Image: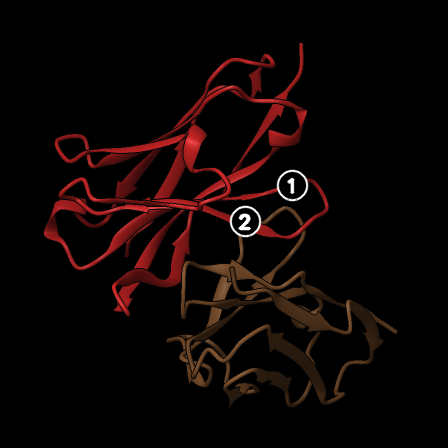
Amino acid sequence: QVQLQESGPGLVKPSQTLSLTCTVSGGSISSGGYYWSWIRQHPGKGLEWIGYIYYSGSTYYNPSLKSRVTISVDTSKNQFSLKLSSVTAADTAVYYCARVSGITIFGVVTGWFDPWGQGTLVTVSS
Amino acid sequence: AIRMTQSPSSFSASTGDRVTITCRASQGISSYLAWYQQKPGKAPKLLIYAASTLQSGVPSRFSGSGSGTDFTLTISCLQSEDFATYYCQQYYSYPSFGGGTKVEIK
């Protein structure tokens, strides 16, 4: 079955760029049919969708984060990545990657998330 | 953005209880709703999508219902492994999650 694993630095300095990678195993990103997403969870808080990408490179971002987010895909490595720029302490969170069973409603790509990676804690601090 | 509100935010229950968690959307979302279970230190796990479709491998004691703005997740007979936090998520528009409902041991 498909498994996802996040990797990247656990500590990022304020104003710098957070970079994470999700490696997919047990299935190919380029086979299509699914989007691939990043979601975060602030400590002790709820879940926030960040964005998702299709194997073709089409991306969709949360409007509240759009100006700082870039999601990219590397089908040769079966990976997709997140970059979040100009981070502050408010970006401290557990970051999850997940597969999206996507549908299109009124031109908006959306869907539910399954499976998820185990998550990685990123702390923004000097 | 569509706001999802869950109630209660937490409650205590006993093994064997029938429990119901409510999720309300700020606008109609048809049946475009999913439910997740999250245990401490773990990633969320999909339980239900399309408001009432049980994800493969999820025990049948879990069920979902609702349409439009009001939804419920029911656990018919609470087991020890069900003590966790539950989240609803709409996918009528860009995804958004409810604030969570923590089910604690009484």
Task: Give the color of chain B as drawn.
Answer: brown
* Secondary structure beneath label 2: strand
Chain letter belonging to callout 1: A
Q: Is residue B44 left or right of residue B79?
A: left
Expressed as whole percent of the image width and height from the top left, the position of residue B83 reads 71, 68
Q: Position of residue B79 (x, y in %)?
A: 68, 78
Indicate which disc, 2 or 1, sits on the residue closer to the N terminus. 1
Report the side of A98 relative to B44 (left or right). Answer: left
Label 1 SS: loop
Q: Is residue A10 left or right of residue A67?
A: right
Give the amino acid at mark 2. Answer: Glu
Image point (51%, 13%), residue name = A16
Q: Which residue lies most toward the top here?
A: A126
Q: Which label is found at residue A42?
A: 1
The red chain is A
x, y percent for residue A36: 30, 48
In the picture shown, does residue B97 fall above or below A52? below
In the picture of the structure, the residue carrying the numbered disc 2 is A48
Q: If the image is split into quadrants, where does the C terminus of chain A sit?
A: top right
User: Picture quarter containing residue A93?
Assistant: top right
> Which residue is rendered at x = 15% and y = 36% of the image?
A75
- Position of the N terminus of chain A, as image quadrant, is bottom left
| Residue A98 image offset from top left, x and y in percent | 38, 50
Would you identify the image quadrant in which residue A13 lies? Answer: top right
Q: Would you call the spot at circle 1 few (<14 residues within 10 Å), some (14-19), or many (20 or more)?
A: some
Whether tag 2 and tag 1 are in contact, CB under 8 A, the answer is yes
Instruction: Please report, as a chain letter, where disc 2 is located.
Output: A
The kind of residue on which mark 1 rests is: His
Query: Camera-side residue: B69 or A29?
Result: B69
For marks 2 and 1, give the CA distance.
8 Å
The count of marks equals 2
- For this rendering, which residue is in front, A81 or A51? A51
